[in-house]
Amino acid sequence: MPRHEFIVVDPDLCIGCEICESVCSFVHEGVFNPLLSRIKRVRIEPIVNIALSCQKCEDPDCVNACPQKALEKDEKTGSIKVNEDKCTGCAFCIRACPFGAISLSTESGIVLICDLCESTEYDEPQCIELCPREAISLKSVDQIGDENRIDAVKRLLSEMLEESK
Amino acid sequence: MTLEGYTQQRVNIHLDTEKIDISTIHEDFCTKWIGGYGFGAKVLWDELKLDIDPFSPDNILVWAIGPYPTTIIPTSSKYGLFAKSPQTGLFGMSISSGSIAQQARRAGHNMIVFYGKAEEPVFIMFDDDDINIIPCKELDLWGKGCWEADEILKEHYNDSRLSVAAIGPAGEKLSRMGCVTNDRNRQAGRTGMGGVMGSKNLKALCFRGTKSVKIAYPKEFYEKAKELIKRSIGTATTKYRENGTPNGLASYNDMGMLANYNFREGYWKDIDILNGQYLNDHYVVKTCGCSQCTIACDHLARVPNDHPDWAGTVASMDIENIYSMGCDCGHSDWPAIMKGIEICDTLGMDGISAGATVAFAMECFEKGIITKKDLGYDLSFGNYKSMIRILEEMGNRSSKIGDILADGSRAAAEKLGGDAMKYSMQVKGLEFPMYEIHGMSSFAVGASVSIRGACHLRNGAYGLDAKGKFDRFGYEKPLERGKAIKKTEDEYCLIDSLIVCKFTRGIYENNQEYCDMYKYVSGYEMTTEQFLNNGEAIHNLAKCFNIREGATKADDYPPERFFTEPPTIGPAKGVTLDKKGYTSILEGYYEARGWTKEGIPTDETLKRLGLDFVIGKLPGGKK
């Protein structure tokens, strides 16, 4: 079975413009408000910029932490589904998530988790479509591992690569 | 009629009594004055007493945004500060980006007006509708640099995304070029708005907003916004994205327009080092965007670890600061420029005026007006270590000469006496940006008629010279030139009122697109005629403010150097401005604006622009 893809942001490309946050709240909630975004920009001065959202962990701490059993990992998409009737906004999932990728809506009092825009009218995650630097992409852990391996080999065996040209 | 986008909330803060009044800005006010610049111009015209000292409690400081912050319109997170300028004594304005505007918008504020002077140094926290005036002593904030103040406040409120606009020691000590720093690298830099904050005992403004922003036509908006975002990362902005604003160093130098040696020359000898590509290849470590900015002109450069003096300094590189603290001071030392920028951004001084004032001091040193005895060290052109030293002394007012220079070159020249004023490169008291105007006959006028003093951001008239629309060494077609200057000036008034960044001006196909976006956000439909008329009205009102304060035609001329001392190398070698020719373009511009030969708007013009309330209030105007 292919592994689930999730949002990955390249910190070399990310300029910290926050458009991903704004568009996320707009397509999900119909308003602009980064506090209602399911992706969060992080800036550490002076030069670190990135955005984080749900990593779709295989054994998600958030699901395990929820005392109401309101969170469930969707087998098909890998997204963490929030049962809005059960969620009480207790925020145990927020405390458990190692990436800080969950937030509590300031309007509904229910937690917000990236669903890759599945609940919206758009087929593709809109943060990806609007990112001005193409810094956001959808990747699985297998793809990431593969890319990292190739990068590492390129670095380690640069001489050999040069010779093969 | 209800308006979206705008919060329509005005907050009046009386610093002396700590009284806070909240009122609603009328829809008609919003659609006539748009936001930012327009709001500032109208409030200052209506409420500021005549002839006041800009540092007295009578000065009024206006903070304003337009309808766009928090939306995804590219570069829409911008705010403006407006007051009577301590540097020019005329209309003061400065615009900055970063995160401030969008946090403030979500907190619900459209315009904040500060009156009086706080009894002791304070900062103000705008936490949604909760507004608190807090003594600086609680956090030991007064005396701190802008970056440190920002960090202290973020930590105090336990919020890494708190938006802070702060002044540094320069503003606290009433530097007439004191600026306001926010988000580390963004400044409301020009005309001394930081000094005005200092005079009000106002150290910092903090914003945190949680409210959502609704817009009038979401579907149409989203479609158009996507298109604008795509265009904003296309060819219209390539230069700003790739090498950032320093890209212009080489191209303007090729035309002899890169000011150096305090505007004696316009062609820089070491352009093979002092150019955007070199900077990018050797020092730039990251490009950053302001909130909702797709362009990220902010190029952060780092002084290498093996540097003996300033290792690890990270500064935001902009062409204006590179000119002012680089070639204008006679050197191309990149680490010194980075250090100079860091000093200005943390001590809170306008980098353009500060650097240009050092260049002025270097020429005074050369001419014996300032001596080694006065300073304790050499301040020759090219001595970049001394440049760093004097910048620190200016920001802290920590030496005799530093104290004199802290108020800019015009105020310093008045104190130094002798021939010093000959070397002060400013109009109306505000130092020039990087354009060397000996061979720029259209922009010489454009920069000099600017409301806030020598400036490239009130109209884009440098483009007329750079793009060869008119002969830049000649003076033909004065009225056509005047009309061209007027056109960009009116458009810039709207850009500064909406407020969006001028770097996105190329992504709108026409003014109709500006009106469409305005409608999709606010719900109010405006024709392009009405839109441009509003821009023209805003400019005229700011001009009338200056006339009321005593500005005359003589204030619309650049320094004598440009008429008498030609550059000795480069494309403008041997060229000076011709005063008669200059005056003909100036009068062509006045005519295009519907002003008298002395530059006073006629009653007919005022009526046409809906400025009837100005009629009869101008000295020298037709009663």
Image: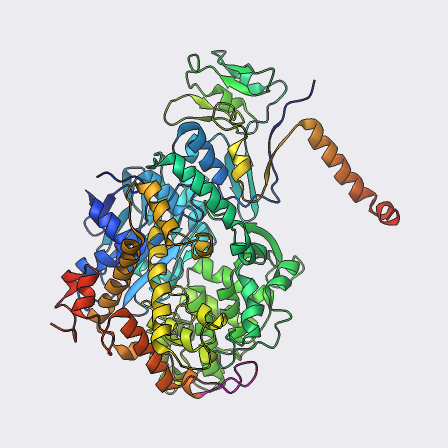
Residue B96 image offset from top left, x and y in percent: 40, 54
Residue B273 location in percent, x, y? Answer: 63, 69
Q: Residue at x 49, y 69 (%)?
A: B467
Task: Identify whether B34 is placed above or below B357.
Answer: above
Q: Nearer the viewer, residue B143 or B158?
A: B158
Q: Would you say A23 lies left or right of B247 here?
A: left
- Whole-percent x and y of residue B292? 46, 45
Does the rendering let one see residue B141? Answer: no
Image side of residue B421 versus residue B594, left or right:
right
Q: Nearer the viewer, residue B501 or B585?
A: B585
Residue A76 lies left or right of residue B100; in this view the side is right
Please tell me whether residue B570 belongs to the stretch shown in magenta: yes
Relative to B421, B573 lies left or right: right
Quadrant containing the C terminus of chain B is bottom left
Is the stretch drawn in magenta largely helix, strand or loop? loop
How many numbered discs sit on the rendered protein? 0
Residue A137: image location, x then y, percent:
61, 35
Quadrant containing the N terminus of chain B in the rendered view: top left
Q: Nearer the viewer, residue B300 or B596?
A: B596
Q: Is residue B382 visible?
A: yes
**Residue, x 42% and y 33% (percent of image)?**
A26
The magenta segment: B565-575
